[in-house]
Image (cartoon, rainbow, N blue to C red):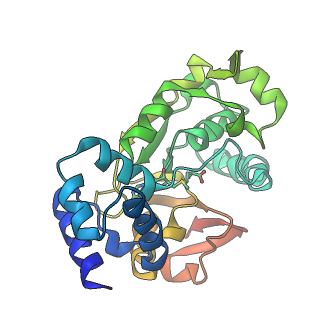
Amino acid sequence: MSADYLQFVNLLKQKTGIDLSLYKEAQMKRRLTSLYQKRGFQSFLEYFSVIKDDKALLDEFLDKMTINVTEFYRNKSRWEVLENKIVPRLLSENQTLKTWSAASSTGEEPYTIAMILSQFIPLNQISILATDIDEKALETARRGLYTERSFAEMPSEMITKFFQKDGSVYSINKELQKTVEFRKQNLLLDPFRSGFHLIVCRNVLIYFTEEAKEQLYKKFSQALAPGGVLFVGSTEQIFNPHQYDLEVEDTFFYRKKR
Ligand SMILES: C[S@@+](CC[C@H](N)C(=O)[O-])C[C@H]1O[C@@H](n2cnc3c(N)ncnc32)[C@H](O)[C@@H]1O
């Protein structure tokens, strides 16, 4: 790690609790270098000396480092496996499902889970925890207003059922909205709740170092109830699930051993 970046990483950790040393370095450094250069700074240190006291610039930094891209039913064929295989199995074993969308970004993922669960359980019995490190993304999620770009893979009957369109804005059904509780959480720092039957954590592990990922797999496994499932993103296969007391239930779905 260059001295400039290393100092930046340390100072940022002291200020925000965010530890960039647990994120893949080359990728993160490239993103952030282009950001500080765009703002006219010469080095990471010079950039830090200003953003530490400038909320707008610090927010911009957080926005750039968190990468919030998401959409409803992202990689739809995997959600079909959740709906047709995983949820029916979980519901044959449990009356209610304790569910967590980790790194939920602007909410499309936990709301997708809610829409799928609503095929099996009345909405007023669904309760999903959704967490992210990015407060701005969480605010958007709580607001429940979306534009066309979030819907590319979403079945049209679900749009009709759960959204009301006003001009170019789609607002989410209030009953569906109430099923999700959004909370701020840093996966690399904060404690996890436990006893989950379903944990969905997609498209964030790819940004972390191997060591950080291994720690997270352990913590996710501990957070699952026996027979519970961890659903990961389509580039995030776990190569040695048994090491974490997990077994493959389907591609990208890992079941906690009983
Ligand atoms: C690319 S989005 C993925 C959103 C959604 N899971 C999906 O697959 O569509 C990555 C999310 O991870 C969040 N994130 C990054 N680092 C995190 C951390 N240490 N703890 C919690 N969330 C984090 C970002 O804020 C961002 O919203």
Q: In this view, does 13 lie to the left or right of 91?
A: left
Q: Is residue 84 left or right of residue 171?
A: right
Question: Vertically, is 41 above or below 3?
Answer: above
Residue 248 location, quadrant: bottom right
Q: Give coordinates of residue 244: x percent, y percent.
A: 48, 77
Which residue shows up at 70% across the image and 23% down it?
162
Q: Which residue lies furthest to the right in this view?
A: 156
Question: Vertically, is 233 above or below 23?
Answer: above
Q: Which of 229 and 169 is in front in this view?
A: 169
Q: Give coordinates of residue 5: x percent, y percent.
A: 29, 76
Which residue shows up at 74% across the image and 54% down it?
75
Which residue shows up at 40% across the image and 81% down it?
211
Q: In this view, does 49 lie to the left or right of 82?
A: left
Q: Give coordinates of residue 50: x percent, y percent.
A: 21, 55
Q: In which quarter of the image is the N terminus?
A: bottom left
Q: Give coordinates of residue 154: x percent, y percent.
A: 77, 38
Q: Is residue 193 visible in this depiction of the protein?
A: no
Residue 188 location, quadrant: bottom left
Q: Which of 132 and 221 is in front in this view?
A: 132
Residue 44 location, quadrant: bottom left
Question: Vertically, is 32 above or below 51?
Answer: below
Q: Which of 166 and 202 is in front in this view?
A: 166
Q: Is residue 170 visible in this depiction of the protein?
A: yes
Q: In which quarter of the image is the C terminus?
A: bottom right
Question: Vertically, is 167 above or below 156?
Answer: above
Counting every numbered tag in the picture gives: 0
